[in-house]
Amino acid sequence: VSRPYHHGDLRRALLAAAAVAVVEQGPAGMSLRAVARAAGVSHAAPAHHFGDKAGLLTALAADGFDAFADALEAASAGGLVDFGVAYVRFALEQRARFEVMFRPELLHQDDPALCEAAVRAWDVLHAAATRHAPPGRDPDVVAYTLWSLVHGFTTLALTGNVPATDPDAVLTLARSVIDAASLAPVDADAVPDRG
Amino acid sequence: VSRPYHHGDLRRALLAAAAVAVVEQGPAGMSLRAVARAAGVSHAAPAHHFGDKAGLLTALAADGFDAFADALEAASAGGLVDFGVAYVRFALEQRARFEVMFRPELLHQDDPALCEAAVRAWDVLHAAATRHAPPGRDPDVVAYTLWSLVHGFTTLALTGNVPATDPDAVLTLARSVIDAASLAPVDADAVPDRG
DNA sequence: TGTACATCAGTGAACGCGCGTTCACTGATGTAC
DNA sequence: TGTACATCAGTGAACGCGCGTTCACTGATGTAC
């Protein structure tokens, strides 16, 4: 009598509930039935929208890669340090999506939306690295170095291996760490002569 | 008639079977019953040895941290790049243990053996970073930078996000990446004067 | 304006499964005397 | 050498649970005429 039969935006609601479940139970521990329960619909509803469990996680990951690429693109105007901090910030703020994005074994890896969004995110990261790579350095190597650094810091932070109480402190440490890697000279004129 | 009632070294056999299961199903997907099956014993045997599922994973992680600390210690004599490569190599060779080590939510986190081994591994990494930190740099920051870099590279490699076919190629790329971060000067006399 | 019908969202019962854990037990080992 | 007994490793039946998936269905919406 209270709730209408049609939800109106159940797909979005299920994705939101899934994000909460992923944070609480981990990507592998999330269950369709728990998500349905949280969204207040029957346990079969998620399968109706996403086909199966991997379908739900794939949708979450594709959304995640899209938002991720947007966030990185927005940070592309600044330097490499700001860019890296944006990477870490996204993961902290969108933890569920971020975690699902890097669990390919749980996803439909050939999903077009997923692949497209993932490629776009990688392109943005690679472009940023190339733009700021010191002259003479292989841009690919710079890209993987940057990626490893910020991804590693993020992973350690998400598993509680970083000594920081609040998110701001984590981001401050992230900044120091990215800075310490000296991937690019602070100032182009100050490049030491390496011969 | 064939197998003796007492296995002789079932604990070790169960840990080995668990390592295989973790690689195949992931740390969360590993089940006590599958491990018992693989070891050829009754499904209740693992619980007899490890108390519960978290107990088995904790034993695997504690073993892992011990072997990890040993491996890093052995690499401490060389430079920071060799040290970092050793980190990556361990993860590739001992994938199951490594993955379990960084899934604290699945473990008995207060297990004494686990804590002791984890602290030892961290001490070895921190000492290496301190020893090679450029003068004037905060050794803590250098340690977290090194850790983020190698941990991130490892994570990306384990999730298939690194363009490399065989383990050797992965380690070669790892070396380039760690080198590119220029955490420490190649040669102490070549430190550029920063004022 | 009204009626018929296609379409789609969401339901709820049912299925079969593998799981973790418990518990009384049995088989083997080794020690005390 | 032999016997009694404590100890420990491993068993197997049983439990209750939550899960993913299927499927015939029902309720609501919207479009064609």
Image (tube, coloured by chain):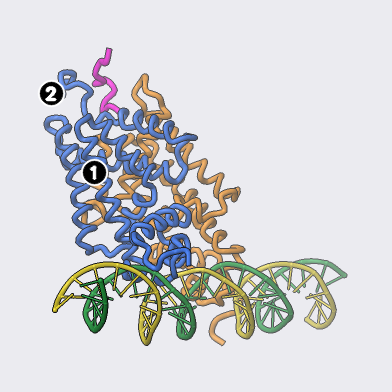
Chain colours: A blue, B orange, C green, D yellow
Q: Is residue B27 above or below residue D6?
A: above
Residue drawn where x is 30% and y is 55% of the image: A61
Residue bearing mark 2? A195
Answer with left or right where residue A163 lies relative to residue B50.
Answer: left
Residue drawn where x is 42% and y is 45% of the image: A158
Quarter-of-image position of residue A107: bottom left
Q: Chain of mark 1?
A: A
Residue bearing mark 1? A70
- In the rendered structure, find residue B84 and report the number of the disc placed on it: none
Ranked by sequence position, the earlier of labels 1 and 2 is 1
B123 magenta-colored: no
Amino acid type, mark 1: Asp
Q: Position of residue B23 (x, y in %)?
A: 39, 63
Secondary element type, mark 2: loop
Amino acid type, mark 2: Gly
Q: Position of residue A145 (x, y in %)?
A: 25, 40
Q: Is residue A9 above or below residue C22?
A: above
Secondary element type, mark 1: helix
Residue drawn where x is 44% and y is 66% of the image: A41
| Residue A31 seen in render | no
Please name which of the two marks, 1 or 2, marks the residue nearer to the observer.
Answer: 1
Task: Pick the residue in front: B3 or B107.
Answer: B107
Image quarter of the C terminus of chain A: top left
B185 magenta-colored: yes
Density class for disc 1 (Cα within 10 Å; few <14, some 14-19, many ≥20) is some
Q: Position of residue B60 (x, y in %)?
A: 50, 57
Task: Pick the residue in front: A138 or C16.
Answer: C16
Q: Is residue B139 above or below residue A9?
A: above
Q: Chain of mark 2?
A: A
Distance from disc 1 to disc 2, alpha carbons, whole Å, reads 39 Å
Q: Which residues are magenta?
A: B184-195
